[in-house]
Image (tube, rainbow, N blue to C red):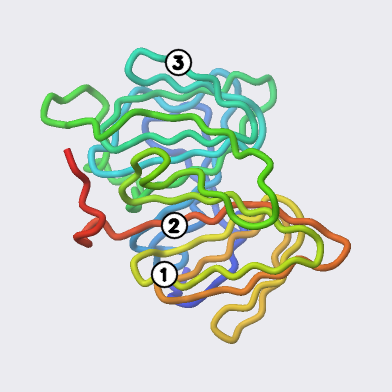
Amino acid sequence: MTMKTIPTVIRAADLAAYSPANHTGTSNVRVIGPETVGATALEVLVGTIVKSHGAKPHAHPHLEQCAYMIEGTGESEAGGRAESIPAGSWSYVPAGVFHTFRVTSEQPGRLLVVYAPPYGENPAHTITAPDPAVQARGTTRVLAAGDAASGCMPLIDRDTVGAQWVEVDAVRLAEGSALVCAARHDAEQVLYLEHGHVEAHAVERRFELVAGDFLFLPRGAAAALRCPTGRRASGFFIRGRDPSSSSATPSD
């Protein structure tokens, strides 16, 4: 697929699935990444995992990982502590934290998975056995998306969980409401629309987004969103910052 560096709408159903390394019973679709939209700071996947399967023990020394439970329920374990992840919840895993994940519901789990910076199934970005040289840069967190009022509500960022390279905001649009996603020169941005319908204008282009769509905004691109009258919409803004920038360098 030809890379794009302009605002682009991507649909997971249009892309091929693959079986990720160090997982069982898992099928992933890479929606946002270098090969789909030319992203360099962010990767977004949609994963489907059958009951009692998921990710084997591993850590990403140089990546932050977030996952949103779209459907089903799961369980994450890190640092000897297991946490349930119900539908409608996000989990945040800092760089260097050893963790596992499995689906616990009878129905397959569907997840939105975010890596910042991109992972790309690169073996150099994963360890499968504890390494004393790899330092955990925080603790895992599970956060409910909640029922925010119309607008944006920060869920994952430096202030809420200590994230260095990734940000997630819950987006809620009442019928007829509008919202501006400001340009970010330090980050790539993605709108994932979970429910509803949204009209978007970005860099003199007009898009119609329906549930399940992704709108990719490269650095420096803003978007104006509008929810049509008689409808409501909800989803998430996901942002990835370049780790090479001085403002995004993690502290020990």
Residue labelled with disc 1: 184
N-terminal of the pair, mark 3 or mark 1, is 3
Question: In the image, is 78 to the left or to the right of 149?
Answer: left
Circles 3 and 2 in contact, beta carbons < 8 Å: no
Type of the residue with mark 2: Arg
Sequence-earlier tag: 3 or 2: 3
- Disc 1 is placed on an element classified as loop
Query: Is residue 191 shown left or right of residue 186?
Result: right
Q: Is residue 49 above or below residue 177?
A: above
Q: Which mark is residue 82?
A: 3
Residue 239: numbered disc: 2
The kind of residue on which mark 1 rests is Arg
Residue at image location 37% in from the left, 30% down from the top: 22
In the foreground, 155 or 72:
155
> Which image quadrant is residue 229 in?
bottom right
Q: In the depicted view, which residue is nearer to us: 197 or 246?
A: 246
Q: Total label count?
A: 3
Q: What residue is at 45 percent from the left and 15 percent from the top?
A: 82
Q: Which mark is residue 200?
A: none
Spatial distance from mark 3 to mark 1, Cα to Cα?
36 Å
The quadrant of the rendering that contains the C terminus is top left
Local crowd size for mark 2, using a 10 Å CA cut-off: few (<14), some (14–19), many (≥20):
many
Q: CA distance from mark 3 to mark 2?
A: 27 Å
Disc 3 residue type? Ala
Q: Secondary structure at mark 2?
A: strand
How far apart, in angstroms, are the residues tagged by discs 2 and 1? Answer: 9 Å
Residue 81, position in %: x, y? 40, 14
Q: Earlier in the sequence, mark 2 or mark 1?
A: 1
